[in-house]
Image (cartoon, rainbow, N blue to C red):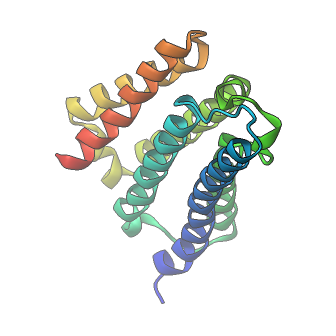
Amino acid sequence: MSDFEFVFALYSLLLGLSMVELLGGLGRAIEARFAAEAERERFAIGWLTPLLAVFVMLDLLSFWSAAWAARGDIAVSNTTLMAVAGFASLYFLAARLVFPSHPEGFADLDVHYFRVRRIVLGLLLILLAAQLGYYLAQPDLAANLARPLAWIMTLILVALMVAAMWVKSPRWSALLLAALVARYVVIYLL
């Protein structure tokens, strides 16, 4: 087993649990919607929380693939294991907060979105800064950042995330989240 395989096992476990958390949250929200319909109560999933979930999942996938790009620079050490565990744990926390534990406690999940968006997007910005710092510290990886397109796409990502953290309008929030999702879809298709 290579150093990368050893470290990646921990990383992928925690990131995989993050994906499960996002999908489980969506499942709970859909179940709450069905229960509300059966009881003739009001419950709206809305667009904001699901869009945030899709964005977090796409962002998570980008970090998963970034780990592959860094595979040649990974060496097993206590510092590496702690850094990977801390990094992936922040991802799990962000994913955990996207959907409420008990969605039936909300009439509309957009309310939940506005409660957690700054925390979730703030955690993702911290993770992005950590990734960029790591890349810049590794000569082989820093070359990936030498292209202007990489910086332009990163600046667009940061600008959209910061805007989504502070916009109060549900319509503008949905547009910003859709733009964040579209940005990743375009990058993945290039």
Instruction: Give me the residue at 63% from left, 64% from top.
Output: 17
Please tell me how many numbered marks the rendered image carries.
0
Q: Is residue 48 visible?
A: yes
- Residue 64 image point, x, y percent: 45, 59
- Which residue is most to the bottom? 1
Which sits in the foreground, 73 or 10?
A: 10
Q: Position of residue 6 (x, y in %)?
A: 55, 80
Instruction: Please give the name of the residue rendered at 67% of the width and 53% of the height, measured from the top-left corner.
Output: 31
Left or right position of 54 against 109: left
The quadrant in which residue 78 appears is: bottom right
Q: Is residue 5 shown left or right of residue 10?
A: left
- Position in image of residue 186 (x %, y %): 23, 39
Residue that appears at 64% across and 26% down: 110
Q: Nearer the viewer, residue 176 or 163?
A: 176
Q: Nearer the viewer, residue 145 or 8?
A: 8
Question: In the figure, residue 73 lies in which quadrant?
Answer: bottom left
The x, y position of residue 18, in whole percent, is 61, 58
Q: Can residue 163 be seen here?
A: no
Rendered residue at 54%/39% (across/down): 50
Is the residue 169 above or below the residue 149 in the image?
A: above
Q: Quadrant of residue 145?
A: top left
